[in-house]
Amino acid sequence: MNEGDLTQLDQLAQLFQFDRMVMLALGIAALVFAVKGVNYLARLLYQRVPSRRLLISQVATVVGFLIYTAGGVVVVFVALEPPRELMLAATGSLAVALGLSLKDLVASVIAGFILLFDRPFQVGDRVTLGTTYGEIKSIGLRAVRLTTLDDNEVTIPNNRFMTDVVASGNSGALAMMVECNFHIALDADVIKARELLHEIVVTSRFVYLKKPVSIVVSEVAIADRLALQVRTKAYVLDVRFEKEFATDIYVRGTDALRRHSIARPSLGAFVSGTAAPAAELEMSAASET
């Protein structure tokens, strides 16, 4: 063993002397008590200002993080007094560790720049990513914030939009196609049903009539029984009224079919099975609007 190795071993031995370990333990204990004190003060503020509970919690979290990070560095330097060579080696190892742990963050930031220039969707678009559907509220450098139709805010890292399939319902436009499915019996008057549903759609206060309105009729199998699926395809004038438009069509359409005695499939067929497309025929009603 050469002299350099002996010197390094001697430096390491000095780091772990008893008095230095005691100072290190006391410093860590002081940091823990300081963070607990911050949390205690935050709980007192909760009781005095309950309306600011979330803000107080966020501030307390940030302060606690700073106490642990900045205080930890100070404690290590004061208690252990590590040599310069050891600090340089530790800094290099820390940089590598941070690079590995932050690779997803860096990928999200790069993807954020790509989203800003490529523009596969815009703020206000209704998009689907996996099982998540909602309206884009903001596009940041790290993540996209999306509000679902039940008013939940979802934060999605930008790099997911680079690898997953994303569907945009309106692509920057206010109008968006909305489809509504009705099922009627195979021997029902499908021509009458088509006319009724077409009238329901074009008279809705939410419909955008500058876009075509069409009715698609399909045969579907429900529990080994054939039935007809009548699908209305029309544009809502503003994506904000998507659910109101669909509800209006379903409520008024169901009532119209009932009043004109358009037979619906039996309840037992729906309970025991699900619909599967068989043959499809599109009957465009745009010429009738």
Image (spheres, helix red, strand yellow):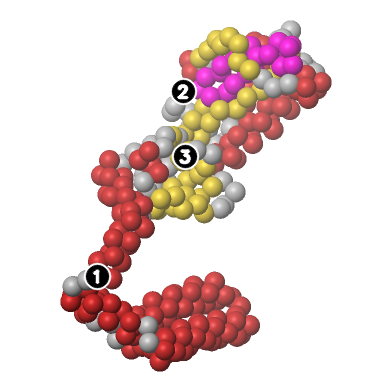
Point 78% across, 19% down: residue: 269
Q: Between disc 2 and disc 3, whose residue precedes?
A: 3
Residue 42 at x, y = what percent? Answer: 55, 82
Give the residue at x 58% y 84%.
40
* In front of the other: 150 or 131: 131
Query: Mark 2: which secondary structure?
Result: loop
Q: Which residue is pictured at 43% across the width and 28% down the height?
A: 210
Q: Residue at x 38, y 42 (%)?
A: 161
Name, please, the residue furthest toward the front. Answer: 1
> What residue is pinned by disc 3?
129
Residue 273 magenta-drawn?
Answer: no
Answer yes or no: is residue 25 visible.
yes
Q: Outermost residue toward the left? A: 3
Residue 202 visible in the current orientation: no
Q: Which residues are magenta?
A: 212-233
Nearest to the observer: residue 270 or residue 15: 15
Between disc 3 and disc 1, whose residue precedes? 1
C-beta proximity under 8 Å, tags 2 and 3? no
Q: Decide whether the magenta segment is chiefly helix, strand or loop.
A: strand
Residue where numbered disc 2 is placed: 212
Amino acid on which the number 3 mark rests in the picture: Leu
Three-letter code for the amino acid on which mark 2 is drawn: Pro
**Disc 1 and disc 2 in contact, CB within 8 angstroms:** no
Between residues 195 and 49, which one lies in front from this camera angle?
A: 49
